[in-house]
Every structure is written in structure tokens, then in C-alpha cells.
Image (cartoon, helix red, strand yellow):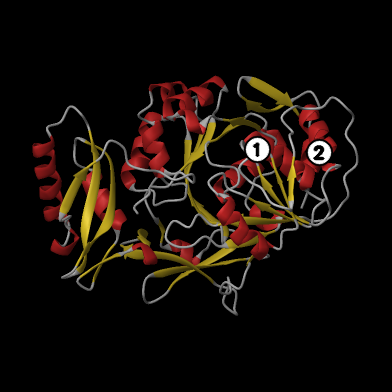
């Protein structure tokens, strides 16, 4: 597969590549900065931990082909997590500009300024990329990939990609962020970095100012973005969703708000890579995918309703003694439960995220979907509340529209759930919150 730098050298050096703050960096500027920085890197196994995504992006370009492996460190990782996971990754050196990370194997650097010097040659070789899973429903694991397994479904037709400007609202050190980054770099598109820490309105304003017309986000993040007035200025032509279940309500809402956009629900994970995409605007995926699978992957559903995938290209693996990523015949357990409804497989949720109510399994996503349909609910999450009699009860934490009376709204929520769900799925507790928490991966936090 063509490398990231090879892909960039096929573009004009003066062409804009990415926007950071209010400044566009050209292809030539970025390549020169990466080449300069490469001279400071060893050829072994390193980790990259940077305070912002743009600095990490240039460090990645410098490390590609020079370093044997690169562990991408999420911004949320502290010293304790690093000391735990660096030995698992076999890391010899941590390269960082973060003052809070210390130790004998730390190389403290600053690559905040681009260089005007000519690009220097970088040693050839295939770098392995080590990415932590999000740990949403358990301890994070480290998954080692090649560029080929990470970018298996990336469209590399630069003639088509040059009209797109992708917005990066995911953290670059995460799998979803890498997908956007690779699509922009390998696909000939431009990229807009945003100020995630500044809040949703500033994020939407950054995207609009950059002329972002291609955007990928989780359903949770999309719901927040659509409430920001600046989102009305987005000239979106391509909308993708991933990381969480894309319910029919969010798919319909996006189609209504952005009628000129093509909308894709992408099924992917750090472990399996990108699996498949659904483009027909309906929740779930067609029954026909099992008999006529999408290009490059097979699907099956076992008797328990668990979805399994078998990619044609596999080179990734768990590190640190974790269980085998694949079965002996190449199948990967996704951990996602599905249910067949007529001609459609519908996602229920993560098997290890279900709430046990007196021996009955409750998927939080199903209850959230029901509550979300109630007028006056802005955001909702569902979690387990410990109970000595039945093990757990269902608790809904709801961000209400301020214009609605909370007593009336609570009554409407309970009434809707009782009319739609089994009794044990109806929330025993409804808690009001000012905001529904979201993690760095853009996913709803139910803990």
C-alpha cells in the first residue's frame, strides 16, 4: 500500500493540506516539518503523546517508515496509564510535548513550528501502529495494525477526493480519528482540525469556517452538533456515523438537515478495522449482507444473536497477552448483539454493556431510543443502578428541554416506556442532568 508521505508527494507542494486554528498549512510545509522531525527519532518502538492533534499528525508522518512501531497515546492517558501500557507495547522511547509526562525514557520535543528547509529522506520500512481501544465497556486493550489493515476501505482516488474538506472531530489517537485522517491524506482531501475543548459551538464554527463538507461523528456527537447554530453553515456533501448504534431517528434527522449529503453508517472497531457501511438511510443492515457480504468482509450471526466478522485482510493483533483477536478460522467476535426484524438486522447493543435486571437482559440503547422519541428530551443515557433485590435497576439520566415542565416530561417518559418496553426495561429512576457526558471518542458515557 502507498505510504502517507508518498500520497502527499503526489500533490502540488503549494496545495493546502490542513487547517489548524485560522491557518492553512501547505503540503510542502507539512512534509518539510515531518522530515526535519524524523531526524530526531530512533528506528525502534516509540510512543507519541502530543497536546494537540496537529502536532501528533506531523509526528506520525515523521515516524512512518522510520520507526518499527508507534503507540498513539490518547490525551486522557496520565502517567499511571502510560507506565502500565508502555511495557505491553514494548515501547523504548516516549516522544512528547506534554509537561505532565515524565520518566527516563522520555524525549521531550516541540514541533509547533513548520520548517522551510528541504525535506530529507526518511528510511523505508513498514511501521506498525498500536492503538488503544476506547475501554467503554471494559479495560482498554492495545491493538497493533499495519497501515493496510487500518486503511483497508479508504478511497484513494485523489481526483475525486480533492473536492472534499474533512473535519476531524474525533481524537486523532483513536481509531475513528485515524480513519478520517487517512481518508484525507490518502484520498487527496483537505483536513480541518478543530478546538474540541472549546465547546460544541466553537467546534461547529471551526468546521464552518474551514468549509468542511465531509464529516464523521458518533450519533451522540451528531445530536450535539445539530443543536449548535453554527452547524447550519456546514455545506455537507458527505455525512458518516460510527462508534455507536445509528438509530432511525438520527438518520432521518441528518437526511432532513443536510438533504444534499450522502449519509453512511459505518460499522467498525479498533479490533476488526472497518467492516462495512450502510447507505440506504435505514437503521441496522440488510439481511442480504450475510449471503452477499460487502467487499472485503464476511458476516455471520450465531445462535445467541452475536455478530461475527471475517475480514479478507487481517494483520492486526492484540498485545500483552490478551485473548486471540480471531478464531482459528479467521472470525472475529464483534461483541455486538443483533436481532432480525423482517429483512433487517437491528443492532441491540454491546453484549457486555447489558443491564441484568433480575436475570433479564436490558440493552441501554433500546431504552434510550424509546425515551429519545419523547418530545422535550434533548439527550438521554441509560445505566444500571445497583439494587440488593434484583441486582440492578434501570436508571435514565435525561437532559430536558428547559421549555418543558419536568413533572409532565417525566410522566410522558414513563408512559412511553410502559407502552413500548417490557416492564423490567422501564426505568425505575429518572434523573435530570444539565448535560449527558461524552468521552474523548465521542461516545455516550453510561458509567
Label 1: state its secondary structure.
helix
Give me the disc on residue 142.
none
**Residue 268 at x, y percent in the picture:** 52, 55
Task: Decide if residue 246 is on the left or right side of residue 405.
Answer: right
Which mark is drawn over residue 184? 1
Say which label, 2 or 1, has the lower sequence index: 2
Q: Quadrant of residue 298?
A: bottom right
Label 1 Cα neighbours within 10 Å, binned few <14 / some 14-19 / many ≥20: many
**Which residue occupies 18% across, 70% down?**
390
- Label 2: element kind: helix
Q: Position of residue 434 (x, y in %)?
A: 27, 35
Residues at marks 2 and 1, CA–CA distance in whole angstroms: 22 Å
Q: In which quarter of the image is residue 394?
A: bottom left
Query: Whole-percent x and y of residue 348?
Result: 34, 60
Left or right: 33 in relation to 421: right
Task: Indicate the quadrant containing the C terminus: top left, top right, bottom left or bottom right.
Answer: bottom left
Nearest-to-viewer mark from 2 and 1? 2
Q: Using residue 70 as the reference point, say whether residue 379 is left or right of it.
A: left
Please determine whether, in this image, residue 12 is positioned above or below residue 121: above
Q: Could you say where residue 123 lies in the image, as x and y percent from the top left?
A: 88, 49
Residue 10 visible in the displayed image? no
Q: What residue do we see at 17% from left, 27% from top?
A: 403
**Residue marked by disc 2:** 37
Q: Is residue 402 left or right of residue 115?
A: left
Relative to the observer, which residue lies in front, 270 or 276?
Answer: 270
Is residue 127 visible in this depiction of the protein?
yes
Amino acid at each position: 500500500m502507498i505510504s502517507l508521505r508518498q500520497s502527499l508527494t503526489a500533490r502540488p507542494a503549494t496545495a493546502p493540506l490542513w487547517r489548524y486554528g485560522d491557518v492553512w498549512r501547505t503540503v510542502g510545509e507539512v512534509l518539510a516539518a515531518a522530515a526535519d522531525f524524523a531526524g530526531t527519532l530512533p528506528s525502534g518502538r516509540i510512543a507519541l503523546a502530543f497536546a494537540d492533534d496537529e502536532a501528533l499528525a506531523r509526528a506520525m508522518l515523521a515516524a512512518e517508515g522510520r520507526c518499527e512501531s508507534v503507540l498513539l497515546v490518547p490525551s486522557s492517558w496520565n502517567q499511571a496509564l502510560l507506565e502500565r501500557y508502555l511495557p505491553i507495547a514494548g515501547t523504548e522511547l516516549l516522544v512528547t510535548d506534554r509537561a505532565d509526562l515524565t520518566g527516563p525514557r522520555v524525549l521531550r520535543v516541540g514541533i509547533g513550528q513548520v520548517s522551510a528547509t528541504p525535506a530529507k529522506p526518511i528510511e523505508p520500512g513498514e511501521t506498525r501502529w498500536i492503538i488503544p481501544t476506547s475501554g467503554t465497556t471494559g479495560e482498554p486493550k492495545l491493538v497493533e495494525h499495519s497501515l493496510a489493515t487500518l486503511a483497508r476501505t479508504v478511497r484513494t482516488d485523489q481526483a475525486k477526493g480533492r473536492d472534499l474538506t474533512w473535519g476531524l472531530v474525533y481524537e486523532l489517537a483513536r481509531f475513528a480519528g485515524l480513519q478520517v485522517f487517512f481518508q484525507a491524506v490518502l484520498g487527496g482531501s483537505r483536513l480541518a482540525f478543530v478546538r474540541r475543548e472549546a465547546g460544541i459551538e466553537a467546534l461547529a464554527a471551526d468546521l464552518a469556517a474551514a468549509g468542511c463538507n465531509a464529516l464523521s461523528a458518533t450519533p451522540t456527537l451528531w445530536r450535539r452538533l445539530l443543536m449548535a447554530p453554527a452547524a447550519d453553515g456546514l455545506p455537507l456533501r458527505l455525512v458518516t456515523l460510527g462508534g455507536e448504534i445509528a438509530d432511525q431517528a438520527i438518520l432521518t434527522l441528518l437526511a432532513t438537515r443536510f438533504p444534499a449529503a450522502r449519509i453512511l453508517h459505518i460499522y467498525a472497531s479498533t479490533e476488526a478495522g472497518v467492516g462495512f457501511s450502510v447507505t440506504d438511510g435505514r437503521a441496522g443492515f440488510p439481511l442480504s449482507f450475510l449471503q452477499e457480504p460487502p467487499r472485503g468482509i464476511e458476516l455471520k450471526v450465531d445462535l445467541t444473536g452475536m455478530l461475527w466478522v471475517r475480514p479478507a485482510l487481517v494483520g492486526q493483533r492484540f498485545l500483552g497477552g490478551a485473548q486471540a483477536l480471531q478464531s482459528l478460522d479467521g472470525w472475529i467476535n464483534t461483541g455486538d448483539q443483533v436481532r432480525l426484524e423482517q429483512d433487517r438486522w437491528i443492532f441491540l447493543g454491546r453484549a457486555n454493556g447489558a443491564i441484568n435486571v433480575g436475570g433479564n437482559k436490558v440493552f441501554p440503547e433500546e431504552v434510550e431510543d424509546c425515551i429519545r422519541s419523547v418530545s422535550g428530551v434533548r439527550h438521554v443515557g441509560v445505566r444500571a443502578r445497583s439494587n440488593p433485590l434484583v441486582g440492578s435497576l434501570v436508571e435514565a439520566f435525561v437532559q430536558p428541554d428547559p421549555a418543558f415542565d419536568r413533572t409532565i416530561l417525566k410522566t410522558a417518559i414513563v408512559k412511553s416506556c410502559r407502552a413500548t418496553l417490557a416492564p423490567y426495561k422501564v426505568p425505575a429512576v429518572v434523573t435530570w442532568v444539565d448535560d449527558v457526558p461524552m468521552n474523548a471518542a465521542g461516545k455516550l458515557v453510561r458509567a
